[in-house]
Amino acid sequence: MNQSHLAVDVLGPAPRPVSATVDGITLSALASWVPQPRAVVLALHGGATDSTYFDCPGRPGLSLLRLGAALGFTVLALDRPGYGVSHGHAHQLTDPARRLDLAYAALDGFLASRPRGAGVFLIAHSAGSELGMRMAADERGRELLGLEFAGTGLRHHPRSASLLELDGPDLRRSPRARARLRDALWGRGELYPPEIFGGSSIGAASPAYESEARDWVHEFPELAARVRIPVSYTLGDHEEVWSSGPDALADIASLFTAAPRVSVSEQADSGHNLSVGHSARAYHLKVLSFAEECAVARENVSSRTRQGRAG
């Protein structure tokens, strides 16, 4: 048996589409269910894609959903509000608080009759970090096991800053600017499978509010200071959208003043789109390892609490 076949054999089954309706708005997701999960991983994709970002088309060995299930985690990849089947309701979702409540309500709907194991761990990428950070900073976020977020930051990469400062209409009017932005988002082609590079196989229409939601980075410090769960932050070592390097990583870590633990790192041989590159499996293994550590920490707290009550 060759190595590529072996990699597929240790993965979980293909994920299934699921949906939950909240206040008349249906949210869709891809799910890999485990009967008795170690924990649940909720994955939030970035901009201009959808839940398929976490189940790389034609490359099951790169799938977070399949790997997570094989390692005992239930994984839910949510089509963020305004994506997937809720795209037609995007005009009702301009308020970040509305999107936050929908995400939490949908999560409860998906898991209503299913076990959560040690709890829910959150992973968010790029523009999805806006929702991920709001979920973690919210009072309800204290119940989450932990947060991994990637592909975002405080300062744009010098080569991309001028492009990312354009508003939506200006960007749409300039094919050249769109091409340059696409180059920044993908970077070096050899980091990705050729059929994935450029994003045509995982692309999705972005809701109109997304360009305005980019300004959430101004709230980053205030949100980060309210997060009280373990945090992991990752940038690809070939990131071209956000400034990277030791100083940038340290700046992010310093914002999470209330988190019990903060881990920051660069992912080797990775560009902006960590979950669809050749190194996606390595990245996902690291994320799931962190989720396992968070599950152990939660169990230890619960054990000490029970012992204290017994004493």
Image (spheres, helix red, strand yellow):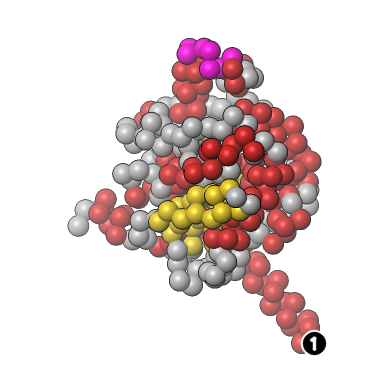
Residue 283 seen anywhere in this rendered image of the structure: no
Whole-percent x, y for residue 122 in the image: 59, 53
Is 103 a magenta residue? Answer: no
Residue 249 versus residue 299 in the image, above or below: above
Which residues are the magenta region?
A: 170-176
Q: Amino acid at mark 1?
A: Gly
Residue at 45%, 67% (x, y): give it. 34
Question: Farthest residue toward the bottom?
Answer: 311
Residue at 75%, 36% (x, y): give it. 219
Is 171 a magenta residue? Answer: yes
Quadrant that contains the C terminus: bottom right
The residue carrying pointer 1 sits among few (fewer than 14), some (14 to 19) or many (20 or more) residues within 10 Å by Cα, namely: few
Magenta: predominant secondary structure element?
helix
Quadrant that contains the N terminus: bottom left
| Secondary structure at numbered mark 1 | loop
Residue at 67%, 36% (x, y): give it. 94
Whole-percent x, y for residue 81 in the image: 58, 43
- The residue carrying mark 1 is 311
Left or right: where 156 falls relative to 139: left
Question: Farthest residue toward the front?
Answer: 24
Residue 281 versus residue 190 in the image, above or below: below
Residue 238 versus residue 250 in the image, above or below: above
Residue 306 seen anywhere in this rendered image of the structure: yes
Residue at 45%, 71% (x, y): give it. 35
Write down the quadrant of residue 189 in the picture: top left
* Residue nearest the viewer, comparing 268 with 91: 91
Number of numbered tags placed on the structure image: 1
Question: Farthest residue toward the left?
Answer: 1
Whole-percent x, y for residue 235 in the image: 56, 38
Whole-percent x, y for residue 107 in the image: 59, 57
* Residue nearest the viewer, comparing 42 with 240: 42
